[in-house]
Image (cartoon, helix red, strand yellow):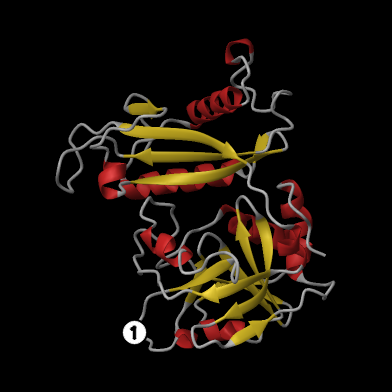
């Protein structure tokens, strides 16, 4: 839903009654600005529009968004925004910059109660953040992963979009400290008593892929989880590269004999998994030595575009 009149662009202050704060009533996007462009902007924009439609949110049109993002980038680089063309996202002054852009859209101010305000004015928050570095060993050797106890509630209405309710991911991410494990796998909540029989969905902030017998698989995002932009790019590139890919409902146990497991993320690209540890201390290990790995082939395009190491 696009409505350029009902937009409140926020810089540093948010009203205490904003529904994004009080109810998590909104959506967000995290976008890589690298090599002079917003990486996969068209996919982020599509998901933003889908999320807005799903939640009946009004959002500004695409040109307004791009202008506002560009001005934020110029301000962040201490450049004179008045002397530069705000519509030119490929300004020479920004070509060498690597930043993370975060967009938050909320329903705006509202009183108590869950019903939508009659005169809602959407709040749009655009912020620019430092580019996060990552150990090259994560890409060369793979990362150690644990299966989280915190599961993902199944709600088809919210599946796929990046809504502001991220408490499940917050709790899951704080189950490990980043030393013994670098990330966690999240399962769909179910009545299964064993993790092994529960449906695998994604990592705490990434999508998950695995390979068996040369076939690429990824969990279907239909009841919970996020439809990642790199996930969508992988589908597009796999088709061009004649890589067979299938999405479906898979249990955690199906990762035990995979030849390759990797995560995809809009900022870090493709990151290989070296090992997975389950709650009963069952461990699975994955070799990074196979030169024909599908993850390596995909990373030659995706990671390179994000200025991240290509898997070997």
Q: Quadrant of the N terminus?
A: top left
Left or right, 234 with reference to 251: right
Residue 289 in sight here: yes
Q: Which residue is mark 1?
A: 191
In the image, what residue occupies the spot 83% across and 65% down? 312
Task: Using residue 108 as the reference point, say whether residue 302 is left or right of it.
Answer: right
Residue 78 x/y as whole percent: 61, 21
User: In the figure, is residue 169 to the left or right of 308?
Assistant: left
Image location of residue 255, percent across then percent down = 60, 82
Location of residue 6 (image quadrant) = top left
Q: Secondary structure at mark 1?
A: loop
Residue positioned most to the left = 112
Residue 241 in sight from this viewpoint: no
Residue 13: x %, y % from top left:
35, 29
Q: Residue at x 64, y 84 (%)?
A: 284
Q: Residue furthest right?
A: 291
Residue 283 pos. (x, y %): 61, 85
Q: Is residue 283 above or below residue 52?
A: below
Q: Give above or below for 7 relative to 42.
A: above
Residue count near mark 1 (Cα–Cα under 10 Å), binned few <14, some 14–19, many ≥20: few
In the foreground, 144 or 228? 144
């Amino acid at each position: 839903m696009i409505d350029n009149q009902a937009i409140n662009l926020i810089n540093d202050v948010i009203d205490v009654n904003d529904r994004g704060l009080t109810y998590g009533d909104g959506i967000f996007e995290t976008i890589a600005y690298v090599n002079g462009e917003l990486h996969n902007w068209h996919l982020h924009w599509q998901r933003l529009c889908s999320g807005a439609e799903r939640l009946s949110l009004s959002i500004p049109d695409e040109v307004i968004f791009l202008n506002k993002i560009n001005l934020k980038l110029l301000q962040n680089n201490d450049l004179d925004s008045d002397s530069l063309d705000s519509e030119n996202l490929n300004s020479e002054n920004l070509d060498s910059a690597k930043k993370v852009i975060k967009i938050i859209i909320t329903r705006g101010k509202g009183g108590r109660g869950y019903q939508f305000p009659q005169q809602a004015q959407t709040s749009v928050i655009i912020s620019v953040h430092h580019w996060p570095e990552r150990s090259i060993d994560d890409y060369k050797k793979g990362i150690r992963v644990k299966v989280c106890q915190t599961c993902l509630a199944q709600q088809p209405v919210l599946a796929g979009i990046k809504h502001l309710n991220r408490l499940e991911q917050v709790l899951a991410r704080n189950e490990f400290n980043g030393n013994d494990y670098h990330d966690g796998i999240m399962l769909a909540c179910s009545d299964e008593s064993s993790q092994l029989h529960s449906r695998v969905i994604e990592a705490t902030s990434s999508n998950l892929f695995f390979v068996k017998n040369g076939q690429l698989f990824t969990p279907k995002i239909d009841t919970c989880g996020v439809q990642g932009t790199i996930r969508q790019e992988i589908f597009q590139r796999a088709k061009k590269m004649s890589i067979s890919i299938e999405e479906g409902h898979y249990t955690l146990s199906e990762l035990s004999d995979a030849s390759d497991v990797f995560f995809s993320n809009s900022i870090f690209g493709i990151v290989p998994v070296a090992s997975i540890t389950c709650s009963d201390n069952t461990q699975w290990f994955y070799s990074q030595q196979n030169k024909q790995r599908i993850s390596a082939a995909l990373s030659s395009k995706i990671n390179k575009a994000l200025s991240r190491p290509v898997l070997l």
